Image (cartoon, rainbow, N blue to C red):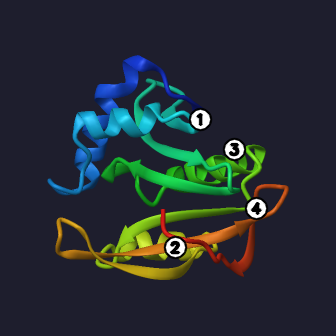
């Protein structure tokens, strides 16, 4: 079984290590960057861990915006935990939390070359909104993806129309 819970300060080093397992150098956050995003005033971090053993399997950092748009800043699942439903649990929990914060839509960025992430987000109802040239490492384009949220925290199968964040 997997439990989702709020981030706790002693988790930080493990979350930073997971981020580095998931993303290459230069795309993975530095300690300072990850801490900064997690401490933003409207941000929250949810952690997925195994009920037995309490091993952290992944996490999501998201934030709400007073304009009604949520933003998934990062969603990281250990490579050995991918394709097990952990990412879906984290994403769906973050979306529900964003709805509680009065968000009507949610946005995120992913590298055009990250085919697994693109398939994952499309499976969860996200659509491509725009491309940001050279977003990662000043050489890899990013896709801005988004979707509308309804009051129950589920996706509406509509294309999100939002500005870059």
* Gap between marks 3 and 2 measured at Cα: 19 Å
Upstream in sequence: badge 1 or badge 2: 1
**Comparing labels 4 and 2, the label whose residue is closer to the camera:** 2
Say left or right for 105 vs 22: right
Dot 1: within a 10 Å radius of its alpha carbon, few (fewer than 14), some, or many (20 or more) residues?
some
Identified at 64% across, 77% down, the residue is 161
Say left or right for 16 vs 43: left
Numbered tag placed on residue 97 in the rendering:
3
- Quarter location, residue 91: bottom right
Is label 3 in a helix, a strand or a loop?
helix
Is label 4 in a helix, a strand or a loop?
loop
Kindly identify which residue carries mark 4: 154
Dots 1, 2 in contact, CB < 8 A: no
Between 3 and 68, the residue placed more toward the observer is 68
Kindly identify which residue carries mark 1: 4
Upstream in sequence: badge 1 or badge 4: 1
**Comparing labels 1 and 3, the label whose residue is closer to the camera:** 3
Upstream in sequence: badge 1 or badge 3: 1
Dots 4, 2 in contact, CB < 8 A: no
Q: Position of residue 58 (x, y in %)?
A: 43, 42
**Comparing labels 1 and 4, the label whose residue is closer to the camera:** 4
Between 24 and 62, the residue placed more toward the observer is 62
């Amino acid at each position: 079984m997997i439990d989702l819970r709020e981030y706790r300060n002693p988790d930080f080093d493990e979350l930073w290590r997971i981020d580095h397992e998931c993303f290459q150098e230069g795309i993975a956050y530095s300690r300072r960057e990850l801490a900064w995003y997690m401490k933003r005033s409207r941000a929250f971090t949810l952690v997925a861990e195994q009920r037995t053993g309490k091993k952290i399997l992944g996490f999501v950092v998201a934030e709400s915006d007073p304009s009604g748009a949520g933003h998934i800043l990062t969603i990281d699942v250990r490579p050995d935990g991918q394709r097990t439903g952990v990412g879906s649990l984290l994403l769906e929990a973050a979306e529900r939390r964003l709805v509680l914060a009065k968000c009507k839509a949610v946005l995120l960025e992913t590298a055009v070359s990250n085919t697994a992430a693109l398939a994952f987000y499309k499976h969860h109802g996200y659509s491509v909104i725009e491309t940001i040239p050279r977003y990662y490492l000043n050489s890899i384009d990013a896709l801005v993806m988004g979707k509308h949220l309804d009051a129950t925290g589920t996706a509406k199968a509509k294309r999100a129309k939002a500005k870059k964040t």
